Image (cartoon, rainbow, N blue to C red):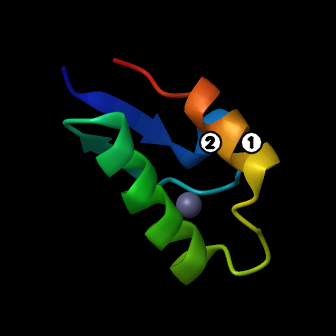
Amino acid sequence: MARTFACREVDIDCQWMITAETEARLLSKIQGHVAEIHRDLEMNDELTSKVQAAFRD
Ligand SMILES: [Zn+2]
């Protein structure tokens, strides 16, 4: 079952969204996006938990 994430779900002012087949793949794509676009954010445990809580089917 595909999972979807959008930056705006965690109050990041960004229109980017992503869908992937697994949560692990989704998280890895989000980490790449954050590293590239949101350089002021650190993908630490707190943000990772927040991001994972915002995943949608
Ligand atoms: Zn973004």
Residue placed most toward the observer, 15 or 54? 54
Q: Quadrant of the C terminus?
A: top left
Q: Residue at x 28, y 41 (%)?
A: 19
Q: Label 1 is placed on what type of residue?
A: Asp
Q: Secondary structure under badge 2?
A: helix
State left or right for residue 24 relative to residue 40.
Answer: left
The response on whether ligand 1 sits within 8 Å of label 1 is: no
Total numbered labels placed on residues in the image:
2
Residue 30, position as x, y percentages in the image: 47, 57
Give the quadrant of residue 50.
top right
Place of residue 41 in the rendered image (x, y in percent of width and height, measured from the top left): 77, 69
Quarter of the rendering occupied by the N terminus: top left
Q: Residue 24 placed where, x, y %?
A: 36, 44
Q: In this picture, is 34 found above or below 47? A: below
Residue 38, compared with residue 21, is above or below; it is below
Can residue 36 be seen here? The reply is: yes
Question: Looking at the rendered structure, which numbered label has been put on residue 8?
Answer: 2
Say which residue appears at 48% left-offset and 28% top-offset.
55
Q: Is residue 3 left or right of residue 35?
A: left
Mark 2 nearby-residue class (10 Å; few <14, some 14–19, many ≥20): few
Q: CA distance from mark 2 to mark 1?
A: 5 Å
Residue at the spot 51% in from the left edge and 64% down from the top edge: 31
Q: Quadrant of residue 39?
A: bottom right
Q: Which residue is mark 1?
A: 11
Give the amino acid type for the residue marked by disc 2 in the picture: Arg
Q: Residues within 10 Å of mark 1 (few under 14, many from 20)?
A: few
- Asked whether disc 2 touches disc 1, contact meaning CB atoms under 8 Å apart, the reply is yes
As helix, strand or loop, the secondary structure at mark 1 comes to loop
